[in-house]
Amino acid sequence: MEEGDHVARFENSKDTVQLAIYNSLEPERPPARRRTSWTNLEGKERDRLNDTVAELNGVIREKDSSIKELEKKLEKADAEGNDTRREFELKLSALEAKIMEAQKT
């Protein structure tokens, strides 16, 4: 049998039938991936990966500081918003009081 053949063959031996089937239609398994350990990398490859890792760490730190700045701005805006809200509530209660006085008269 050659590779790529689709063969069904029967063999008789002492009242036993043996079936040999070679099916080339089965999908081939992909070759196993070769794992590369850090120590197996050549100097240039290792330097390139170190540079990439350093660059990604820089981006992460930058985004982290941006998030912290935005959180501070949000806290500040929230605090200012609360003051404005309190002022609005005071004005509203003053108007309600004036309306109640006007209804009494």
Image (cartoon, helix red, strand yellow):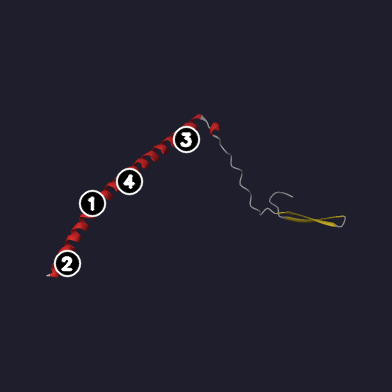
Compute the Cα span from label 2 to label 3: 74 Å
Crowd rating for badge 3 (residues with CA inside 10 Å; few <14, some 14–19, many 20+): some
Q: Which residue is mark 4?
A: 71
Q: The C terminus is located in which quarter?
A: bottom left
Amino acid at the residue labelled 3: Leu
Residue 50's mark? none
State which tag comes first along the sequence, 1 or 3. Answer: 3
Compute the Cα span from label 4 to label 1: 18 Å
x and y, in percent, of residue 1 in the image: 74, 50
Q: Which residue is mark 1?
A: 83
Of circles 2 and 1, the one toward us is 2
Of residues 75 and 1, the one nearer the viewer is 75
Query: What is the residue that sits farthest to the left in this orientation?
Result: 105
Of residues 60 and 55, the one nearer the viewer is 60
Compute the Cα span from label 1 to label 3: 51 Å
Q: Which residue is mark 2?
A: 100
x and y, in percent, of residue 79 in the image: 27, 49
Residue 49's mark? 3
x and y, in percent, of residue 90 in the image: 20, 57
Amino acid at the residue labelled 1: Asp
